[in-house]
Image (cartoon, grey):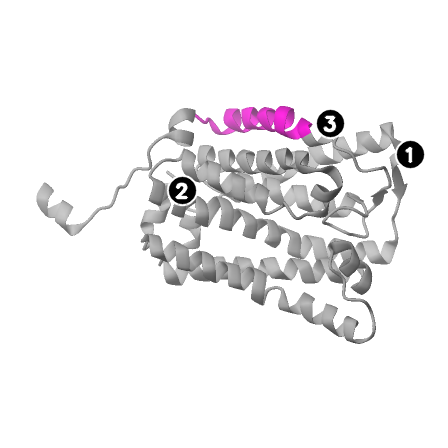
Amino acid sequence: MYIEQGLNGKHESWRYLVGVLIIFIGWQLVGSIPLLAIVIVKSLGGETFPTDVAGMSKMIGSNLFLFLMLISFVFGLLATFVTTKYLHGQTIVSLTTSRNKIDWKRIFFAFGLWGCITVLITGLDIYLSPEDYVFNFKLQPFLILFFISILLIPLQTSFEEYFMRGYLMQGIGLMAAKRWVPLVITSLIFGLLHLFNPEVKELGYGIMVYYIGTGFFLGILTLMDEGLELAIGFHAANNLLTALLVTADWTAFQTESLYRDVSNPELGWDVFLPVLVIYPILLYVFSKKYGWTNWSDRLAGDVRQIETTELTKESGA
């Protein structure tokens, strides 16, 4: 069972509290130094210090801003791995999956499936509402964006999965001893971390249904499949294609993408369709492909505190 993989390392509650602090420092403090340094240098040259994503992107250029923003997640991922290995004495494989080794086929299947669906939905929307899009392709900026995205976005999304559905899922699960507790908590945290995205300001709090719903979807994938592989693949495809295909002046990803959305931002069907229709269908597809059973136990059952000790061995002898 996936949550029980945390028992393979040192899992006292204080270690997870210290671990979260270490990961936060690596991600938000150390990881933000390069971006902050560039912005400060630009400001010292007479430019106004920006306070929002769009302002920083405009000041230093969208590709450089994206690169520096994604670097912070690389530091977060490194901090997560270091914390897991040295503070908990746990292997990265056991943080990733309950299988003996990481199943890359699962990662690529989820990536390919969601990638195809995303391209199809985006292409259909551009075809049906051409007035909402402007072709934005510029060869050199797009190639730079492509290489930055291919290199760093999978690391960004992997950090979010390893931290949310990995480290926190196992830690909270072991403390609470109930599977539904980390599922709910990590999904809410995942959603709330997007609370200050510019999309929330433009579309209102209704978009939190999408963020929190996506958190639940990824959490269900992890618990039902006993590993992070499907969530890692899905999340990487989602963010990578978001960066490459369509951008807008009011989104968190300001990129040199193929298209620019010039429509007035509004809370529409595209926010609720994934959560209410597409995600349930995907769960059905994955469940059939990988033979998922015992849904209630895997999502809401007890976490089995199984630890083999010398005392147990002696008493059973």
From the viewer's side, name the closer residue of 169 and 207: 207
Where does label 2 land, which residue? 98
In the displayed structure, 136 sits above or below 284; it is below
Q: Earlier in the sequence, mark 1 or mark 3?
A: 1
Q: Mark 2 to mark 1: distance in Å?
A: 48 Å
User: What residue range appears in magenta?
Assistant: 272-293
- Look at mark 3 in the image and give the residue it sits on: 269
Q: What is the quadrant of residue 148 in the picture? A: bottom right
Kindly identify the residue that appears in the image at 68 percent across and 47 percent down.
Answer: 197
Q: Give the residue type at disc 3.
A: Trp
Residue at 69% across / 71% down in the picture? 37
Spatial CA span between label 3 and label 2: 37 Å
Q: Is residue 50 left or right of residue 166?
A: right
Instruction: Say above or below: 57 vs 104.
Output: below
- Label 2 sits on a secondary structure element that is loop
**Mark 2 in CB contact with mark 1 (< 8 angstroms):** no
Where the N terminus falls, by quadrant?
top left
Crowd rating for badge 3 (residues with CA inside 10 Å; few <14, some 14–19, many 20+): few
SS label for mark 3:
helix
Q: Looking at the picture, which amino acid does disc 1 mark?
A: Glu
Q: Which residue is mark 1?
A: 131
Which percent across, then down, holds residue 58?
82, 59
> Label 1: how many residues lie within 10 Å, few (<14), some (14-19) or many (20+)?
few
The quarter of the rendered structure image containing the C terminus is top left
